[in-house]
Image: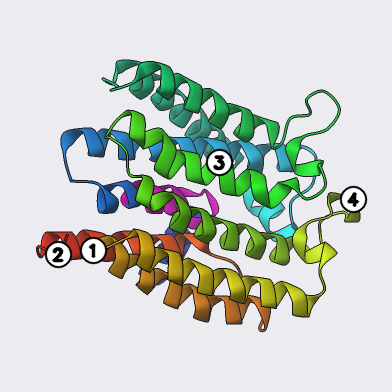
Amino acid sequence: MHFLIFKKVQLFFRKSFLSLSLSAALLIVGFYPMTCKALILAAFIFFCVESTYTLHRLAKYKFNLLLPEDNLWMKKNRILVLVLFLLSSIMIILIFFLSELQNARSAAAYFALLCFLGLGYVIPFPKKNLRSIPFVKSITITLAWTILIVVFPSSYLGSKTMLLIPLMILFLILAILGDWRDKDHDTLSLKTIPQMLNSKNTRCLIAILLFLDFIVSFYFLEGAALISMCIGIGILGFYCYFILIKLKQLYPDGVLMIIALSAIILDSIGIH
């Protein structure tokens, strides 16, 4: 009985994107000094991810674009998911306008760009959304995550430009893996990377990106950040095998969570 309850809670935690949102928030705690400002920003990022991904899920549910299992789960949890979306959206507004920013203009510009990418991914402007423009799907996701985790925090906690390229490549790999997972369900008009490349070339591209990310991490990072990224890239390499060869489910939150937790642990024992 207790095991069944645990499984239901775990499923809801993952399906409602709470796990992904938590992993994003922990990246801030892991890569920045653990101050009150960092914790507030981590909360903001948690709600940003939760709100955006839940909006996408609600839009897909409305237009009957979800996979059968996700559609069934949404039917059972639609009200709670909607409450999560509304609560997250309110918290985003409250934290953004009540927080003390080092550069309010930059923060507003980055936030506006994030809103454009998040809303434009599902809402047509005016005839097409960003997701339906050929080749743009993976790039949109990569840019949004990079701005959220690296660029936007620079207006609040100070610049961490050394994280830009390593994390951007990591997010691009995860975005391509997402397109690989969806390649049999996405329409051909999307022209995603896995659709345009054959299976062999997609695997080669991801292998090149993994190696490149490993190299640039050594060039730009040091201490806990470098070790954490290397651990994450190594685990992502094994993860890619199961996604690309064995066709298992995609859980990007697992990779991000491992990077974040390893950085937090290393920082806590004095490795900086």
Quarter of the image holding residue 114? top right
Mark in front: 2 vs 4? 2
Which numbered marker is on residue 224?
Answer: 1
Which numbered marker is on residue 189?
Answer: 4
The residue singled out by tag 3 in the image is 144
Q: Amino acid at mark 2?
A: Ile
Q: Position of residue 125 (x, y in %)?
A: 78, 25
| Cα–Cα span, label 3 and label 4 | 22 Å
- Whether label 2 touches label 3, CB < 8 Å: no
Q: Secondary structure at mark 1?
A: helix
Q: Secondary structure at mark 4?
A: helix
Going from N to C along the chain, the mark reached first, 1 or 4, is: 4
- The answer to whether 106 is drawn above or below residue 13 in the figure is above
- Whether label 1 touches label 4, CB < 8 Å: no
Q: Residue at x 41, y 16 (%)?
A: 105
Mark in front: 3 vs 1? 1
